[in-house]
Every structure is written in structure tokens, then in C-alpha cells.
């Protein structure tokens, strides 16, 4: 019986790796110099790509995901348009004076409210909804309690903000929580 060989002697013999010259890409030096010379373009391109990525990964509509009663049916938007078509809506912040200050004290930023305008009782006192599902962004502390009512800052579409301002000049405004 032959004697066992020491460990590692059964491995094949090593071979040398031949020397290779450096790998060069044709025109790379020229491209690098051109990029350095046009640094502003490169920065602008980087900003544009970053902005596109941020828009694509933008905030999701978390209110609809939580099963809000105002959510749209599957396959359509809240305005009834098909889901594939998006409508650009610009929102603005609108400070609104609500007639009942005690109601405003119940509000917190993030609440959704409907704003209702009521005319004077002498003219029939008809009430109408001026804004639906407005987002409360701030509830400032009252400055002068003698003013009557309280201020609340709402985030609404630009057209809705115009209706709110118009209603606030002639009617008393109230809110209901959504």
C-alpha cells in the first residue's frame, strides 16, 4: 500500500499569466475632455434626469388608498375620467374666515372639510356648498376674539379658492368634517 501524499500535492502545477498591456477605449480621452469643457450641459442633464426620476417616483395618493368614501371606482378618477387620463390641477392655499370659532377649534391640519356658504336669514338664508373635501393645512391661533369667527387655511384648487373668496364677502361660511 502506497503511503499517503502530503496535502496539496495533488493540485496541478501553477502557470504564469502572460503580461497584457492596458485596455484603452478609443476616443474616451476626447469624450472626457469634451465633458469637462461643457460642464454646464452635463450638470443640466443630470438635474433633468434627477427631476424626471423624482416625478416618476412622486408621492402617492394616500387618502384614496385608505378607503376614503370619496374615492373613485376602480379604473376611473374621482371626476369620472378614465384612469389613464390625468388632469393637471393646481392647488393653492386659501385663508378662510369661518363664522363659528368653536367649530374651527375642532379642526386639525390634515382634516378634510366641506365649506358651506349661508346667506342672511332675511333673504331666505339658502345654503350652498362652496368647496368639497378641502384639505386643512393650518389652524392659526385667534388674534382678536372680538372679530367674530376664526381663520382656517385650506388647500384647494384655484377655481375653488375664487369661489371661497367670493362667498366670504357676502355670506357666512361654515364647515363640516368629511
Image (cartoon, rainbow, N blue to C red):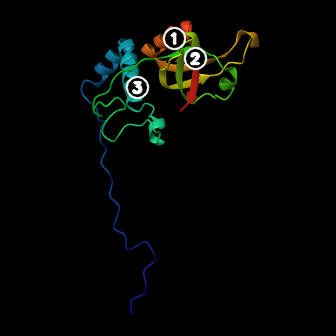
Distance from disc 3 to disc 2, alpha carbons, whole Å, reads 44 Å
Question: Residue 56 or 46: which is nearer the viewer?
Answer: 56
Q: Earlier in the sequence, mark 1 or mark 2?
A: 1
Which residue is at 37% across, 30% downward?
56
Q: Which residue is mark 3?
A: 50
Distance from disc 1 to disc 2, alpha carbons, whole Å, reads 8 Å
Q: Which residue is mark 1?
A: 167
- Position of the N terminus by quadrant: bottom left
Which residue is at 44% across, 34% downward?
61
Q: What label does residue 15 carry, if any? A: none
Q: Earlier in the sequence, mark 1 or mark 3?
A: 3
Q: Earlier in the sequence, mark 3 or mark 2?
A: 3
Number of residues whose C-alpha sits closer than 10 Å to that of mark 1, classed few (under 14), some (14–19) or many (20 or more): some
Residue 115 in percent (x, y) is at: 53, 22
- Determine contact: label 3, label 2, CB under 8 Å: no
Distance from disc 1 to disc 3, alpha carbons, whole Å, reads 42 Å
Relative placement, left or right, of 67 versus 110 is left
Which residue is at 29% across, 25% downward?
28
Which residue is at 47% across, 12% downward?
163
Q: Nearer the viewer, mark 1 or mark 3?
A: 1
Q: What label does residue 173 carry, if any? A: 2
Question: Residue 37 or 23: which is nearer the viewer?
Answer: 37
Relative placement, left or right, of 164 versus 2 is right
Question: Residue 58 or 177: which is nearer the viewer?
Answer: 177
Question: Residue 92 or 52: which is nearer the viewer?
Answer: 92
- Determine contact: label 1, label 2, CB under 8 Å: yes
Amino acid at each position: 500500500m502506497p503511503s499517503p501524499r502530503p496535502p496539496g500535492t495533488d493540485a496541478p502545477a501553477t502557470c504564469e499569466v502572460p503580461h497584457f498591456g492596458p485596455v484603452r477605449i478609443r476616443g474616451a480621452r476626447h469624450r472626457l475632455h469634451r465633458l469637462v469643457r461643457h460642464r454646464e450641459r452635463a450638470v443640466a442633464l443630470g438635474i433633468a434626469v434627477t427631476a424626471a426620476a423624482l416625478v416618476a417616483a412622486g408621492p402617492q395618493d394616500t387618502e384614496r388608498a385608505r378607503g376614503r368614501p370619496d374615492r373613485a371606482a376602480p379604473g376611473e378618477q374621482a371626476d369620472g375620467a378614465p384612469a389613464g387620463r390625468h388632469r393637471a390641477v393646481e392647488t393653492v392655499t386659501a385663508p378662510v374666515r369661518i363664522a363659528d370659532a368653536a367649530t374651527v377649534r375642532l379642526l386639525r391640519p390634515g382634516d378634510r372639510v366641506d365649506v358651506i356658504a349661508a346667506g342672511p336669514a332675511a333673504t331666505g338664508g339658502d345654503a350652498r356648498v362652496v368647496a368639497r373635501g378641502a384639505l386643512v393645512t393650518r389652524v392659526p391661533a385667534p388674534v382678536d376674539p372680538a372679530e367674530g369667527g376664526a381663520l382656517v387655511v385650506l388647500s384647494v384648487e384655484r377655481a375653488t379658492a375664487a369661489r371661497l373668496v367670493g362667498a366670504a364677502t357676502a355670506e357666512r361660511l361654515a364647515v363640516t368634517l368629511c
